[in-house]
Image: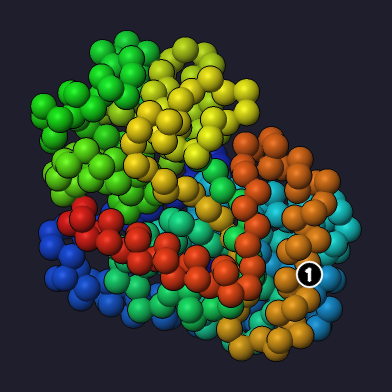
Amino acid sequence: MSPQHDQPPPGGAAPAEPAAPPGNRRPGRRIGMAVYAVVAAVSITAATVFSFQSASAGNDLRAALTVIAPAGVGGGWDSFAREQQQAMRGAGIVNNVQVVNIPGAGGTIGLSTFSTMHGQANTIMATGAVMLGGIALNDSPVDLSDTRPIARIAEDYNALVVSADAPYDSMEDLIAAWSEDPDGIVWTGGSAGSIDHLIIAQLALDQDLPASEITFIPKSGGGEAIQTLLAGTTDVAVTGYNEVEDQIAAGRVKALAVSSPERLEGVDIPTLSELGYAVDLVNWRGLLAPPGITDEEFAELEAIVAETRESAEWQESLQRNRWEDSFLTGPELLEFIDEDQARTTALIEELGL
């Protein structure tokens, strides 16, 4: 596997995430460690590539910066990284910004590579809620403590949708059917252990339904998930609202709820919270610095990210993508990551993954 640079593959399709190994989670640890033995070799190759890039850029972080998207082209992390790229360039904060894709295993292959890039301050990486799920699901020997988190930057929210002709017109209808037949409702969303999957688990626990009995068909993205819904092979899709907004507007699917704490501006869809469901997971995204950089370099990266967040270009990105600003840095960020990792790991265990 080699890093994928700015140009998408033919057809622009994002590579599918590898499926989680079947069966009990503990035996899967051996498989996970075998995967990471392979990843170590990948990391050496990738680190060599980035080392050359970093050396060629010199010490001026505002001259050139690489942003790793730890997923395939076209997905949420890729979109986030490229919006950061455009905002940094457009606002004149960094002269040259490139995006490199290192997909796989819920972002943990990219994380494993990134953790070897000691001192390479000219490279940063996107992270977020999905990566915490990948760390827990894949028994990753590397986590965010092996990096230097810069900031949590934005959040986006999920929609729970059914086909236009589904017999459910409200969350109450859906929950009633699910309660009668817990494994009879077929759910779909992103990869196993993704934020989509975890929202369903949290909803199940809130309704005293066994999360381990959830019938969930993972897909590589919202587009594929919606196709299964329209084909009638699944009953409910959980995916980012911005990925399904057009389908809702066209009347192909019905949105029963969104996971935001408050109603999205201009969107007449109730929130899970206002409907009385204790579901509060959000799909946050942020940026990491590599280990081994100096405090001065880290401070400069913090300044670059903070300036980008304040730029008109990034504010326009937030509005266009319906992302919510959730900027957080410093000790509060580290505390947030620890708490979110613990909660995510607990939900993965409830799912029996």
- Residue at image point 53% right, 20% down: 268
Closer-to-camera residue (178/335): 335
Q: Please, is residue 122 above or below residue 107 in the view?
A: below
Q: Residue at x 29, y 71 (%)?
A: 139
Residue placed at 33% from the left, 14% from the top?
Answer: 169
* Figure quadrant of residue 31: bottom left
Q: What secondary structure is found at the residue carrying circle 1?
A: helix
- In this rendered view, identify the residue nearer to me: 164 or 307: 307
Q: In the rendering, at what x and y percent does residue 30 appear? A: 20, 75
* Image: 117 above or below 164: below
Asked if residue 38 lies left or right of residue 92, the reply is left
Crowd around label 1: few <14 · some 14–19 · many ≥20 (10 Å): some
Q: Which residue is mark 1?
A: 303
| Quadrant in which residue 215 is drawn | top left
Location of residue 347 by image quarter = bottom left
Residue 164 in sight from this viewpoint: yes
